[in-house]
Amino acid sequence: MNIITRIREKAREKPKTIALPEIEDSRVQEAAKIIEKEGIAKILLFGCGMLDFDKDKQKVYIQQYYELRKSKGISFAEAAKALEDPLYYAAMMTHCGDIDGFVAGASHTTPDVARAAIQCLGVDERIGIASSCFVMYLANCSYGEEGAFIFADCGIVPEPNPRQLACIAISNAELAQKILGINPKVALLSYSTKGSAKGKAVDKVSEALTLARQMKPDLLIDGELQVDAAIVPEVAKIKCSDSLLAGRANVLIFPDLEAGNIGYKLVQRLAKARAIGPLIVGLNKPCSDLSRGCSVEDIVDCVAITSIRSQL
């Protein structure tokens, strides 16, 4: 049984209510039918001009959003205007506990989805930063966890500093363990392996490793590592024979957004990997973004993972 099948089965064990606020997209409509037919989740489907809501609930969401954002200078009228946007409506439904999570991004950009999610759901104080990841799956692949990986951050934080990079590593390791049921083996990636090159970018990754080990001593993490040294045991023996990962990393933390975004798309398109996400990590409640190039199956699997996250 591959990891995609396991994800869907786990979601079916305890279906949650997930909003898809992009009804105008035909892929979303088709995905909603599959999700409900397979019992993966209970779907609430709406979109622009199609907010069929309870007026009393709407007032609650506006007031709650205003309370969340008034310290940032937002007016009540601006809060009411924001709640006309399906993304913010879905996010506030999640915030208030009326649904269990939401998935969007088929027809919205990542910044649009992330902004609504962060403003409405809030950042988990334990983590201190919102980031994103992809669950990558390559069939018939011996690397990672039987072909499964977490790639992060591929969608939100452009230039993470060492502490942010450490927090991204920790939060995505937790997701790998809780959602995929795997023992996370985390590699902090670089163009250098254990001092083979020098530079500020290498120093940043090395410092992130130190911080991550201080913050979570039991986490199996190493760096800085080139990607072949991180995932290929034979290369690891040559380049970093003392690495705790031994070339068997399954959580890959990229040094910046540029590397992460390019990396996941190369693997997705050239190796024909499944790329589920970007899942937004580090918030108080679960949600997921989607690539605007997503397939129907991608939407189904993002909903499945979001549903599983709300079970925990």
Image: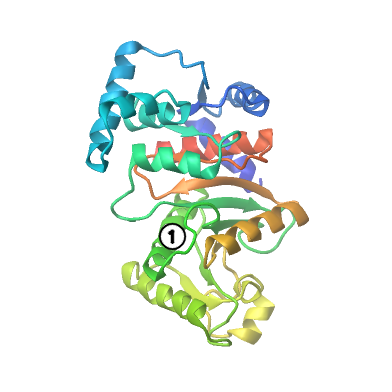
Residue occupied by mark 1:
168
- Which amino acid, mark 1? Ile
The residue depicted at 58 percent of the width and 22 percent of the height is 23
Instruction: Measuring from the top left, give residue 44's x and y in whole percent.
Output: 49, 21
Crowdedness near tag 1: few (<14), some (14–19) or many (≥20) residues, C-alpha within 10 Å: many
Q: Position of residue 144 (x, y in %)?
A: 62, 62
The image position of residue 172, as x and y in percent, is 46, 56
Q: Indicate left or right for 75 with 298 as reference.
A: left
Find numbered disc 1 in the image and state the secondary structure of the residue it sits on. Answer: helix
Which residue is nearer to you in this view: 100 or 93? Answer: 93
Q: Is the residue 228 above or below the residue 51 in the image?
A: below
**Residue positioned 45% across, 69% down in the render:** 220
Which quadrant of the figure contains the N terminus? top right
Residue appearing at x 39%, y 50% in the figure: 282
Query: Is 120 drawn above or below residue 22 in the view shown?
Result: below
The one of 61 and 38 positioned closer to us in this rendering: 61
Which sits in the foreground, 185 or 102?
Answer: 102
Q: Residue 18 placed where, x, y %?
A: 48, 28
